[in-house]
């Protein structure tokens, strides 16, 4: 069972004081890897024996880890806490099947109280390397460093999406962020990697390039652009997955842009026999709106 499906089940078993204690852990992540009984009692306003009782439950459910350094919040603990926040704030009401599992995130279909579909993306950056570290060092390193990295990454993607979405609907529409989780509007369609045939592959490629151009002029390059992060629906394209995006003014921006363009052109060449020059494509992406319309005007005459 994935961490979040387990969260969906366990959330119903927890009571108010369990959540109060989870909240103390979540809000002190940045400052404390481990918490002891007296700190927890102080922050939660619950007596030590009550805290002990709830901690035992949270440890049993696999939400809190225990070591000789103290108690620490585990990934499932933060998943549960986030799920509760999303429900309390009426962002989502129910969590459904997992629809995507990548190296960096687990993605679920969810519903709000009006029965509208939503997407829940939970960050799992560096999951495999973290597991190795954890195995080697047991609990002594805690999981908070890893959780903080995932929270910061979720925040980065949320901010970029909010900013990009103003300019084009070809980027996901972010609705809410809490800790390591982003809630978005769903994008319906097929991942480019799974598309068997396209009516007009040339026009789809043009649209991808146009979206890259829009993002570039807003100051961003996706940095992980490939057929797995593009969704196609009829004539529309959507570019997902922006946590690794780089600013166009960073030192290696040119290299990153070149890699993204090369990935896409390679895919269209392999699958649809469309050949396009990398350099010329990069020139188009760097052209502003007015330079493009100037170009159009001159070819019209
Ligand atoms: N807004 C969305 N609507 C529909 N499906 C999505 C959405 N966001 C992500 N997905 C699905 O989840 C998969 C993984 O999401 P992605 O953002 O690419 O994360 P990562 O690849 O880092 O795990 C995507 O390939 C896509 O199938
Ligand atoms: Mg992806």
Image (tube, rainbow, N blue to C red):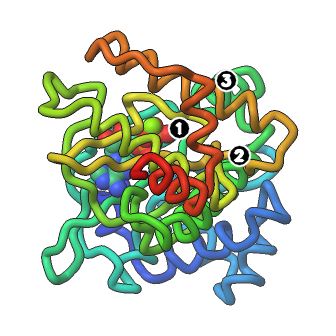
**On the rendering, which quadrant does ligand 2 occupy?**
top left
In three-dimensional space, the C-alpha distance between marks 1 and 3, rounded to whole angstroms, equals 20 Å
> Relative to the observer, which residue lies in front, 18 or 117?
117
Residue placed under numbered mark 2 in the picture = 246
Nearer-N-terminus badge (1/3): 1
Q: Secondary structure at mark 3?
A: helix
Q: Quadrant of residue 31?
A: bottom right
Look at the image and tell me in which quarter the N terminus lies: top left
Nearer-N-terminus badge (1/2): 1
Residue 301 percent location from the top left of the image: 42, 52
Q: Residue at point 40% right, 86% down?
A: 89
Vertical position of residue 157 compared to residue 19: above or below = above
Nearer-N-terminus badge (2/3): 3
Residue 146 percent location from the top left of the image: 70, 45
Residue 70 percent location from the top left of the image: 77, 54
Looking at the image, can residue 66 be seen?
Answer: no
Badge 1: how crowded within 10 Å, few (<14), some, or many (20+)? Answer: some
Residue placed under numbered mark 1 in the picture = 104
Q: Residue at point 65% right, 45% down?
A: 286
> Relative to the observer, which residue lies in front, 64 or 80?
80
Q: Secondary structure at mark 2?
A: strand
Residue placed under numbered mark 3 in the picture = 135
Looking at the image, can residue 23 be seen?
Answer: yes
Q: Secondary structure at mark 1?
A: loop
Q: Residue at point 75% right, 70% down?
A: 28
Q: Disc 1 vs disc 3: Cβ atoms closer than 8 Å?
A: no
In three-dimensional space, the C-alpha distance between marks 2 and 3, rounded to whole angstroms, equals 32 Å
Vertical position of residue 204 compared to residue 113: above or below = above
């Amino acid at each position: 069972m994935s961490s979040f499906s387990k969260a969906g089940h366990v959330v119903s078993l927890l009571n108010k004081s369990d959540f109060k204690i989870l909240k103390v852990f979540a809000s002190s992540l940045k400052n404390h890897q481990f918490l002891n009984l007296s700190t927890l009692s102080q922050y939660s306003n619950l007596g030590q024996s009550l805290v002990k009782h709830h901690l035992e439950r949270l440890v049993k459910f696999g939400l809190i880890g225990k070591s000789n350094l103290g108690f620490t919040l585990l990934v499932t603990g933060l998943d549960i806490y986030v799920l509760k926040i999303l429900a309390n704030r009426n962002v989502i009401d129910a969590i459904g099947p997992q629809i995507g599992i990548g190296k960096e995130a687990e993605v679920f279909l969810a519903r709000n109280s009006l029965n509208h579909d939503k997407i829940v993306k939970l960050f799992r950056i560096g999951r495999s390397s973290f597991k190795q570290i954890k195995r080697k060092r047991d609990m002594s390193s805690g999981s908070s460093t890893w959780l903080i990295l995932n929270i910061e990454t979720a925040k980065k993607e949320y901010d970029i999406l909010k900013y990009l979405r103003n300019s084009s609907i070809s980027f996901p529409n972010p609705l809410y962020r809490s800790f390591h989780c982003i809630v978005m509007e769903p994008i319906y369609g097929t991942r480019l990697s799974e598309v068997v045939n396209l009516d007009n592959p040339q026009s789809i490629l043009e649209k991808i390039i146009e979206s890259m151009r829009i993002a570039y002029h807003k100051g961003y390059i996706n940095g992980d652009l490939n057929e797995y992060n593009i969704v196609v629906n009829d004539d529309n394209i959507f570019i997902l997955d922006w946590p690794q995006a780089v600013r166009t003014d960073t030192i290696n921006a040119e290299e990153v842009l070149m890699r993204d363009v090369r990935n896409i052109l390679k895919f269209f060449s392999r699958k649809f026999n469309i050949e396009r020059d990398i350099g010329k494509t990069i020139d188009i992406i760097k052209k502003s709106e007015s330079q493009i319309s100037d170009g159009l005007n001159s070819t019209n005459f």
